[in-house]
Amino acid sequence: MSPAEVAHRSGFACIVGRPNAGKSTLTNALVGEKVAITSSKPQTTRHAIRGIITRPDAQLVLVDTPGLHRPRTLLGQRLNDVVRETLTEVDVVGFCLPADQKVGPGDRFIAAELATIRREGRGTPVVAIATKIDMVDRQRLTEHLLSIDRLGEWDDIVPVSAVRGEQVDVVTDLLVKHLPAGPVMYPSGELTDEPEAVMVAELIREAALEGVRDELPHSLAVVVDEMTPREGRPEHDPMLEIRVILFVERSSQKGIIIGKGGARLKEVGTNARRGIEALLGQKVFLDLHVKIAKDWQRDPKQLQRLGF
Ligand SMILES: Nc1nc2c(ncn2[C@@H]2O[C@H](COP(=O)(O)OP(=O)(O)OP(=O)(O)O)[C@@H](O)[C@H]2O)c(=O)[nH]1
């Protein structure tokens, strides 16, 4: 093994913070436009990938944390297990606190949750990120950094302006620092098949769960079977054919996904297609099939086949 291989790090991070804290803008700045996925709302246990940062020494995969970005709806409730699970599973958490606003109840709520997770979990490191620093003067920034410091125990505190691109690389460095040694998990460079397929599957999963989350909690697995350019299309207007299988566990669930006369599946396809076309920047033909894989969650072989 070469020294470069020994030093390579890879792992997962999630960016949390109260509404409007600048999470999406920072995510896009960290990732660069190309592979940032803009869809949100993944209220499921599977982690939606928001973006992948690939550099010579590391690969950092940013995943979404359902729920924590809406602390107001969670205040006074017990934090959803899924959120805790995600935060425990990632290698590092980035906690955004906007410099143009004082540290408030929403931030304290998240800070307390992060402290609990750190104590009870496996000590997930947290990097506190003071966002939107271009909006304040030096004095206010100093005050803000001091309040962040008082708010909890952080592995690092870093100021950033995602809009001006100031300190974005420093944020990446600090997140990467906490990743374990490991190989590249997703092919690098241009958008490649694998992360594309992962993101496409996530978009379809989101669309399929829209409005039926209670009935289909974690029983849906989406597998992209094939992505091929449609033949005979003009060069300036290509179309990608994507064949996808949606696996559910029971026939009742199949019925929910498909809907009366296939109406719901059609709607799912239309909604997902819009997101996928925006993501890939080209026309897409989406072919969705629903299959029953009984008890796939409990069957290791099925799980492997479904990519978990
Ligand atoms: N001036 C300035 N504005 C920023 C910066 N980062 C984000 N914003 C603005 O702050 C607002 C909220 O940013 P988002 O990135 O959408 O925040 P978010 O945390 O993802 O918000 P939610 O989706 O509500 O949780 C937007 O209007 C951004 O343009 C920054 O570095 N500087």
Image (cartoon, rainbow, N blue to C red):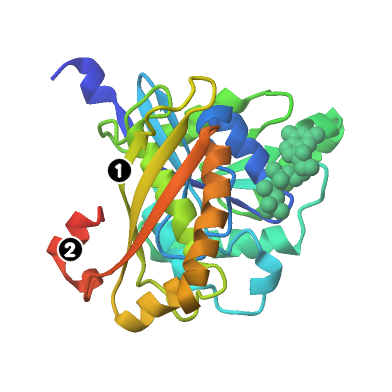
Element type where label 1 sits in the image: strand
The residue positioned 58% from the left and 59% from the top of the image is 41
On the image, the x and y values in percent for residue 19 come to 71, 55
Mark 2 and mark 1 lie on one chain; the one further toward the N terminus is 1
Residue 6 located left or right of residue 145 = left
Secondary structure beneath dot 2 equals helix
User: Residue 192 location, x and y as percent?
Assistant: 37, 30
Label 2: few (<14), some (14–19) or many (≥20) C-alpha neighbours in 10 Å: some
Residue at x 39%, y 41% (from the top left corner): 241
In this orientation, does residue 55 appear? yes
Near-viewer residue (307 or 244): 244
* Residue tagged 2: 302
Residue 147 is marked as none
Q: Which residue is mark 1?
A: 226
Percent position of residue 151, x then y: 66, 54
Describe residue 191's horizontal placement relative to residue 132 as left or right: left
